[in-house]
Image (cartoon, rainbow, N blue to C red):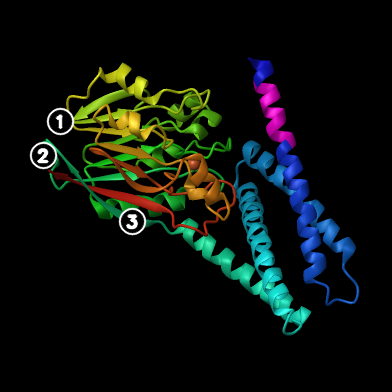
Amino acid sequence: MIKKITSHFLVILSSSVFLLISGHFLFYLILLDVLSFLSVFPFILTISFLACFFVSIFLAQFLVSRFDNLYSSTYYFFIASLLGIFWQSVLVYFVLISARFFFSFFFVIDPIIFAWSFLGLTAFLSAYGFRNAFSPRIKEVDVEIQDLPDFWDRKKIVHLSDIHLGAVYRHRFLTKVSKLVDNIKPELVLITGDLFDGTDGDFSEAGKQLLQLHAPLGVYFIYGNHENYLGRLEVARHLLGSGIEILDDRLTKINGLQIIGISYPKEGTRHFDLAKKIQFLSGSKLDSPSILMFHEPIQFKEVSQLGVNIYLAGHTHRGQMFPFNLITKIIYHGYSFGIRKFQQMTAIISTGVGTWGPPCRTLSRSEIIAITLLKK
Ligand SMILES: [Fe+2]
């Protein structure tokens, strides 16, 4: 088992290093072209900068996991943001060279104009991405449910996913999210995993800070894949005193509404039978209106056949940046975000409240989902 985990880790590490080196080399080539108007290319400066950045990616991660303080988290935030800016610059560059190629049939674009366009568009796209990552919007969804108990008719539930508390999303962001949730006045708050980012920082105050997230009938949480990285026991310890209840492969009934919480399996979902797991917990057919909380959007058809009314998921972040949205779309067969209907079941796949990696989103805003239950 340990041997398997070690080889798995080595594969991930070596492919990440390979991708990073290729990315740095690509960025070097881009700078070589963009700065072609200079009489002498600043070779030493560029190489030093790229080398520092490469080392910083690992160093920032190490420092924030060992010494979580204002300096290490600022450093981590800076490097993560720079990674996002670099990625936007690569996209902008490919758009600009395509435009330059097209216009080359009519006139020659001045290299200085080209460089300013590169800089301006990268700055614009990055600023747009950062704004989307830190200003969650409220997404309103109405869901009609047959035989919904009278108590729940026209009541609200808030769905939060992927907050990723850690070096980037900290106490201030949580306060912002909590205030937005309070304004919705929900009866329940349901958190579908990745509440923590998994960077092994200082969460000694987490329990107290998470008290801000509250609702009259409770706040429920399930483990996502990032809680498995941090360690479930560790997460449970962080949540002590927060008032948040962990639905770790169990269900609860609140005023006739069943909430089923399934943890993200430690071995991943490749061979995981979600419908079977639900059946194991609840019997062959669900006898009351039910909401399923599972981190990843999978096996919708099988789950809907059990009689589940709402399936809450997250995980994908809708790819955060182009072209990763296309990858999540392919992996999740077109169901990587938004609202989908499967017979009586409404699947609600959140794009997430926070982000993973670069705190940047160019394809969607961070979102808090406010669900209004309606009796059919
Ligand atoms: Fe996530």
Q: CA distance from mark 3 to mark 2?
A: 24 Å
Residue 339 at what x, y percent from top left? Answer: 33, 48
Q: CA distance from mark 3 to mark 1?
A: 27 Å
Task: Please report whichever mark, 3 or 2, sits nearer to the chain's N-terminal start.
Answer: 3
Find disc 3 in the rendering and name its residue.
Answer: 138
Q: Where on the picture, by quarter, is residue 261?
A: top left
Q: CA distance from mark 2 to mark 1?
A: 8 Å
Tag 3 secondary structure: strand
Tag 1 secondary structure: loop
In magenta, the rendered stretch is: 5-14
Q: Amino acid at mark 1?
A: Gly
Tag 2 secondary structure: helix
**Residue beneath the point at 55% across and 55% down:** 321
**Residue beneath the point at 17% across and 46% down:** 155
CB at mark 3 closer than 8 A to ligand 1? Answer: no
Left or right of residue 85: residue 139: left
Find disc 1 in the rendering and name its residue.
Answer: 256
Estimate how packed mark 3 is, as few (under 14), some (14 to 19) or many (20 or more) residues with alpha carbons within 10 Å.
some
User: Where residue 151 is drawn, which disc sits there?
Assistant: 2
- For the stretch drawn in magenta, the main secondary structure is helix
Estimate how packed mark 1 is, as few (under 14), some (14 to 19) or many (20 or more) residues with alpha carbons within 10 Å.
some
Q: Is residue 143 above or below residue 218?
A: below
Q: Are marks 2 and 1 in contact (CB under 8 Å)?
A: yes
Q: Confirm whether the magenta stretch covers residue 7.
A: yes
Residue 82 at what x, y percent from top left? Answer: 66, 57
| Nearer the observer, 327 or 160 | 327
